[in-house]
Amino acid sequence: MSQLVQALLKVNSLCVSINNREVVSDLSFDLSSGDILGIVGASGSGKSISSLAIMGLLPHHGKITSGEIIFGSQHLEQLSSFEMQKIRGKHISMIFQEPMTALNPSMRCGDQVAEMLSQHTNMPSTEIKKDVLNLFEKVQLAAPKEVYRKYAHEISGGQQQRVMIAMALACRPDILIADEPTTALDVTVQKEIIDLLCALQAEFKMAVIFISHDLPLVAEMADKVLVMQSGKMVEYGTANQVFKSPTHPYTKALLKARPPINHRTTKLPTLDDCMRGKDHYPIIEKASRGLRHKEIYSKSPLLEVVDLDKSYAKNLQWWSKAKVFKALNMVSFKIYDGETLGLVGESGCGKSTLAKCLLLLDPPDQGRILYRGEDITKLSKKSMRQLRKDLQIIFQDPYGSLHPRMTIGRAISEPMKVHHLNGNAHGRKEAALSLLNKVGLSEEHYDRYPHEFSGGQRQRIGIARALAVEPRLIICDESVSALDLSIQAQILNLLTQLQKDFGFSYLFISHDLTVVKYMSDRLMVMKNGQIVEIGEADAVYERPESDYTQKLISAMPEVF
């Protein structure tokens, strides 16, 4: 009897090195037409490097040292760059993690997709444009003709991701590699993208390699799952086998590191904890939380926001009338000492605008922001500068917020100098070293530069810098959104412990409802610049009152 299923792609004993250091070791798997293979693992485990090796896109200091990558009858590892160009895009395509950096900023979106078709087909230009518009409709882009003419910076993150998908699908490839295609997208857009990928995969009969650190998402989408640790495959099987009955300690540790949805624990188990056999911590009883809340809310609020408004001019052209977009519309809420107030909502709902308004980085058009009863919108620049030590922010992108030519030690001690804290240079250095220790870094990191650190380490540096001036309120703006589960657990534990130690408050902004529920005392939901629901976090999640909140919760991947 002939073999019913012929493997489309075979990876045999693949080894990859970067700067002569082995980063992928002895990796093997098969991929057949119609398969969806999920690849999971912590940052640095080799997930993305493996996919880049398949695509022939390794960095110049990277190389395949041994092993085979067989596509059909071709050994991809033996092909020249010119020969790989004929395969790349036409037969094997890739959706990259960051569409804004993957898309050409100087080309219109439609032209970028059209270029893919012109390179790999003999279609006339008129037919190419029709096909691109058809692809834009398939990926459910509203107003495809308008998107065709726009540049990447003129469209939203979700739209950028859809353009990337259209480009990857332009030549109807046999294999689609999706590398973290939903990172930093809100839950509703994430669900739309995943549903879209599944529908297109079925329509085009493609094989898909789906790389993600979001385990519930992989469990929902993939047929088979491959778990990588330190460049090696440690577990491989059906999604049900891997997630319901994991056999390897590392897989078990990854699953344990995700915040539980139905309860809270004193600490999240990290990978190191689990590998040492410490895979669970005591549950915080609701009665204990109730007593804590009673104490918090019996006092006057630390910050009170009253009827905050903010508008922007949109699509302003010299020949047309300005369109006004209302980013914040009569927003009112309170934050109390020692409280964590969670803030969720779809992209574009006004979360980050609100954060910038609270810090007066982008002053509101009207409304009041009362800090300990004083309206800070009426303060002079000098007075506001003095107040900034009490109000700090941890940015979503720590690398973008750190000066590339400033050492970490200077980045942390500079705010102390501005606010005349910790005496002289020696005192500031000692304080900075103490903060580095508090966030899990060491003295040797003091004189290093941002590019020398991992994403998780840079996030810790951002936290240390925020703590440097002894604030009372810290705004966490998507501060864990792009981190894998192991690093995320470390950062969440750190934030929780620091709050216990120093007693400050958080405004915790995130699109991950599981994380924000775990961290928050109260939960606030925003839609179109307005607060649609606010209440105790468990109550909002378990008994949402607004249809919009119900929509957000229903869009979450099921927790295994």
Image (cartoon, helix red, strand yellow):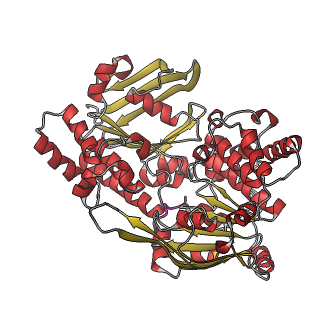
Question: What residue lies at 29% left-to-right and 20% top-to-bottom?
Answer: 82
In the image, the segment drawn in magenta is 556-560
* Residue located 57% across and 20% down the image: 19
Q: Nearer the viewer, residue 51 or 247?
A: 51
Direction from residue 27 to residue 246 in the image, left or right: right
Q: Nearer the viewer, residue 334 or 439?
A: 334
Task: Residue 458 in the image: state x and y as whole percent.
Answer: 66, 43
Residue 496 rendering spot, x and y as whole percentages: 74, 59
Res. 535 in view: no
Residue 444 in the image: above or below residue 149: above
**Up/down of 158 relative to 404, above or below:** below
Whole-percent x, y for residue 304 in the image:
67, 78
Residue 331 location, quadrant: bottom right
x then y, percent, for residue 538: 63, 74
**Horizontal relation, residue 414 to residue 82: left or right:** right
The quadrant of the rendering that contains the C terminus is: bottom right
